[in-house]
Amino acid sequence: MCEEEEESDTDRAELTVNPVTNLPQQPAVHSTQTTNRSPSPKRCKLDVPTRVTHYRTKETRMQAFENALDAIQKLIISKRHTFVSGDHSLQAYRARCIESYLHLIVKYKHSRIVASECAAKSHGFAMKWGGRMVRMWAQKWMATRELPVSMKGRHVKSYMLLQDPTVRAELRSYVRSNKWSMNLEKLAEFTKGTMTPAIAQEYLKEIVHREMPEGLKKYMELELFPQIHMKVGQGISLRTARDWLPHDGKKKSWVLDGEQPLHKKGPGRGIHCSDVICSTFGWLKDAGQGLEYGKNHDGFWNGEMFVNQLKTKIILTFKKLHGSGFQALIAVDHSQGHSTFAKDALLVSRMYMRPGGKQARMRDGWFTKNDQRVIQSMNFPSNHLDHPNSPKGMWQILIERGLWYLRDHCDYTFPTLQSNMPDALASVSMETIRKWEHRTVRWMDAYHSGLGAKDAQLQVQAFSSRHYKSHRRVLETLAHQLD
C-alpha cells in the first residue's frame, strides 16, 4: 500500500498545469533507446556518377544525329529513290532542310532551335514556324526514317450542289426573271423609281427578307431539284436561300455568292495613254501619246504606233532633257501594243502559199546544207519569166530547201502515195537518223532511272542544249553561220 501510494504521488507530482488554459499537461517522457535510421538519399553514392550519365546520354544523342545525317545524305544522292513529284518538289526541299538541320548540329554543335531556324530560313521557310516544322520532320526521320509527306490535295473534299455550273446557271436565270415577285405591278413601280423613298425602302426590305428567298426556296424544292432527280428531305431554309443571295446596294444588282456583276465586253469608247516616266525627271509629258480608242474613233493601239512614238517623241524628249552623251534604257511590258516586227521580217504569217499577191517582201534568209550556210532570196529576180521581182511564197521556199518532196510528186491518189513513200524515207540523211537514235537512247535512260516526264525532258535537253560558262564566247560553227 505504501509503494502504490508513493507511485501515485509521484504521478501526481509529474503532472503540470498550463497557466494559460488551466488544463493539465502530459509529462514529458525521455526515451533512452536509440533507433537505426537509413542515411539521407542525397548522401547515397551512385554506381555511375551523374556527370558520366549525362555525358553518355549526350554521346548517344549525338551518335543518333550522325546516323540520321548519314542516312539522309545517302537518300538524297541515291538514284534509286525518287521524291514525290520529282527532285524539285516540296518533299525534296524538306529533305534538304532536314539535312541542313542535322549538319549544323553535328558539324558546328549548334543547338536544335538555332539549327532548325537557320535551316528553315536558308531553304525559304519561315524562321520561327518553319523551325518548329523542321524539328518535327527531323524527329520523325530519326525515329522512323520516313520523310514528311505533304497533305496538299489530300484533305477531305466536300462538294456543294451550288458549285455545279448547271445549277448556278439555273438559279441565276430564275433570280433575273422576276418570277419570284408576289406583286409584279409593285415591282415595276420600284424598278422605274416612281415610289416615294420611304415606301421604296420598305418594299426593298420586303424583297430582300421575304419575297426573293421564299421564291428561290420554292423554285429549288419544286422545280430545280426534281429536274436533277434529287429529293429534298426536310426542305431548304430561308436562311440558306438568303445566304445564296448577297445584295450589293450600290450597284443594285442580284448576283450569286462568289460572282461579280461584270459588264459585257464590246468595242466601247475609251482613252488610251502611252506615257513615259523617268527616274531623273519623273513624268515626261512631251514624250506621251494618247488616243480615243473604239470602233468608230481612232482605232486601237498597236506596235506600229509605239514605234512611231519612240522615234518622234520619246527619243527626242530624252535627248532634250538629258543632253548628249547619255543612253536611254527603255523598259516596257510584254503586250501586243509594244511588240512589232520590221516590214521585211522573216515571218511565215506574212507569206502566201503561192508566189505574188499582196504578201510582204522579205529580206534574204538562209539555211544550212552540208554544214554550209546557204543564202536564200525570198523574192524572184527581176528577169524571172512568170513572177519577176515578186515574193516567192512558202511553196517555192520549201522546194528550194528540199522539203517539198511528197507534195510536189503527189496527185492525191493512194497508188502514188505508195510509190512516193519509199523515196521520201530514202531521202532522210544518215546524220538525221543518228541524231534521233541518240535522242531516243537518252529518253530511255531518263525513264529507266525513274524520272518523271518533266525531269526526263530536262535531262534530255541538257544533252541537246549547250551552256557556255566562259565570258563572251561563241561557238565557232555558230560564228561561222553568223558571218
Image (spheres, helix red, strand yellow):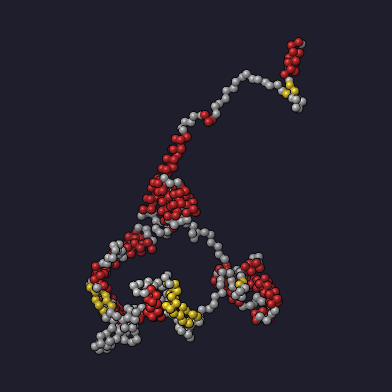
Is residue 426 shown to the viewer in this render? no
- Residue 247 occupies quadrant: bottom right
Picture layout, residue 276 above or below residue 61: below
Check the picture and name the quadrant holding the C terminus: bottom left
- Residue 202 occupies quadrant: bottom right
Q: Nearer the viewer, residue 359 or 284?
A: 284
Left or right, 197 with respect to 284, comes to right
Left or right, 14 with respect to 155, comes to right
How many numbered markers are drawn? 0
Q: Residue at x 45, y 80 (%)?
A: 290
Q: Residue at x 74, y 11 (%)?
A: 3
Q: Residue at x 64, y 69 (%)?
A: 242
Picture layout, residue 392 above or below residue 171: below
Q: Nearer the viewer, residue 312 or 474?
A: 312
Q: Nearer the viewer, residue 213 or 287?
A: 287
Is residue 75 shown to the viewer in this render? yes
Relative image position of residue 426 (x, y in whole percent): 25, 73
Most extreme residue toward the bottom is: 385
Q: Residue at x 46, y 81 (%)?
A: 291
Left or right, 361 with respect to 198, comes to left
Most extreme residue toward the top is: 2
Relative image position of residue 253 (x, y in whole percent): 60, 75
Relative image position of residue 229 (x, y in whole percent): 59, 70
Relative image position of residue 35 (x, y in whole percent): 59, 22
